[in-house]
Image (cartoon, helix red, strand yellow):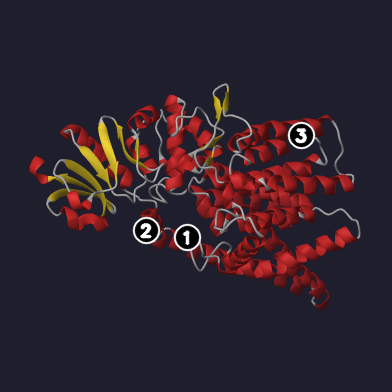
Amino acid sequence: MRRLAFYVQKYLFLLILILGIFLRIIYLGSVPGGYHRDEAYAAWNAFALFHEGIDSSGHSYPVYFEAWAHGQSALYTYLMLPLIGLAGGQVTSLVVRIPQVVVSIATLIAVYFLLRKIFTQSVAIWGMFLLAINPWHVMMSRWGLDANLAPGLLIFGLLFFLKGMEKSPFYLLSALFYGLSLYSYAVIWLVVPVMLLLQFLFGIRHKKIWVDKWSVLALFLLFFLALPLLLFLLVNMGVIPEFKIGCFSIYRMSDFRSGELAGSLREIWENIRYTAYFLKHQNIGQPYDVIMPYGLFYISGRFLLLIGIPVLLIRTVRAMTARRFTYEWFVVVQLIGAGMIGSLVSVSVHKINILYIPLIICQVIGLDSLSGIGVFLQKYYSEKAWRICRWGAVLLVIGVYLGQLVGFQVTYYTDYKELVSAYFQEGSEEAVRFAMAEAAERDMDVEVNEGLKYPNVLLAAEIKPKEYLDTLIYSEYKPAPSEFSGHGVTFYMGIDYENISNDRIYVLYFTDLEYFQDYKLTAYHDWYVAVPIKLN
């Protein structure tokens, strides 16, 4: 029976992994269509670094990017560099999204081993299954936002932290992933040290952690990885001047976002209230963040949270009161870290993204608690009847979740596809390239609808950073550019509708069509290129 159970668990693991991979890679390059503006900025910075070694602000391999003047984490951009090399120096949607989908798939495996370590094999299978089909995790796996690396990296760090309690060389891997997580999302800079301290003190108290060469090396590795960001903070606080370490830049930003954190108890309370409202309704972000009524966790997941969170907290409090070691404390620590973020910043779907995997773990705890009730009732049934009831319950839960998954996937590839492609400006890349080719042939300039942001234009036109910076003219709303040039063509960001000229080519949204009735129009989804007819 044990051998049979082993093979069942093994094949379930493979089936769930295959399902999770399939949900994340099918049509990856085309759904969502286009690029989110932050995704485009990270991609163009990768393109710029690959070709000329500087970013959009002229800095050489910075530890943190001055995207939009207020910053963007660097890790995602650097992960794209080898893929751009494999793609011959070009950026494609697959190149942009492969880092995220690889980390997301690896997270499925990490969650399985984490839950097997904390709970049981069956809980690990259920947790992997719930994460594999989770709406939030599937959706965020399919586009390249820098912050969405953080949940997976923190899970990797936690998994190897727990494994390090048994074999201390694993602490090195834990330090590596915790250190890398700092380069994925600036908001977690405050909470990662707190989480690590809570984990470390608990392990020390229960004699699960001891000082040896591996733990000391891990500490030095974590400090080494965090040091450039510590120096970056000192530079931007005016404590030390900006400088370079080899080719890497640690510079002073034009707009350092230190004011985003709550500065008063009132602001903290408002953030907590807003976070609670968000978790209740799960529909306060951009329209492309969630698909209702599926939300972040499906309706069934929300129900299980009402059971799992109290059970987790009660078990943990009981264990700590009895001074007994429990791995569940480490799940609570993840909730504490995410709760800190929810109290310090104005919440959005991606800002508290490190909360969602711990909440999925809470759902599994809720499900496991319900099965515990079934075990209690087992004495009232015959063995045969009990087996029938147990497997019936298992199949019912799987059926409910798969039914919700089917509904979610149908919506994702139909209504949501149209919605997100509009927000991600599908067709604009082709429109920019066509407009640039027409403008180069006719020795004309291009005006671009202001809804299309300059990183999207830079990426589509494959303009290299030196040419961009040499021709850049800022608008009055610096650092947004009013114009720049690439490949001999000048792009003006924003259309002057009162002075439509026959000497220019226009990249416009479908809402602009009324202004260009006398132009030859070429459509790319909702985007159009308008070329003066008199020149054709």
Residue 90 seen in render:
yes
Q: CA distance from mark 3 to mark 1?
A: 43 Å
Say which mark, if any, is on residue 219.
Answer: 3
Disc 1 crowd rating (10 Å Cα; few below 14, some 14-19, many 20+) is: some
Most extreme residue toward the front is 238
**Quadrant location of residue 322?**
bottom right
Most extreme residue toward the bottom is 380
Vertical placement of residue 389 versus 122, above or below: below
- Give the mark nearest the N terminus, 3 or 2: 3
Q: Which residue is mark 2?
A: 418
The mark lying in front, picked from 3 and 1, is 3
Element carrying mark 1: helix
Q: Nearer the viewer, residue 263 or 33?
A: 263
- Give the mark nearest the N terminus, 3 or 1: 3
Q: Which residue is mark 1?
A: 409
Element carrying mark 2: helix
Residue drawn at 29 percent across, 52 percent down: 525
Q: Quarter of the image containing the N terminus?
A: bottom right
**Quadrant location of residue 432?**
top left
Q: Is residue 83 left or right of residue 431?
A: right
Q: Is residue 375 left or right of residue 58?
A: right
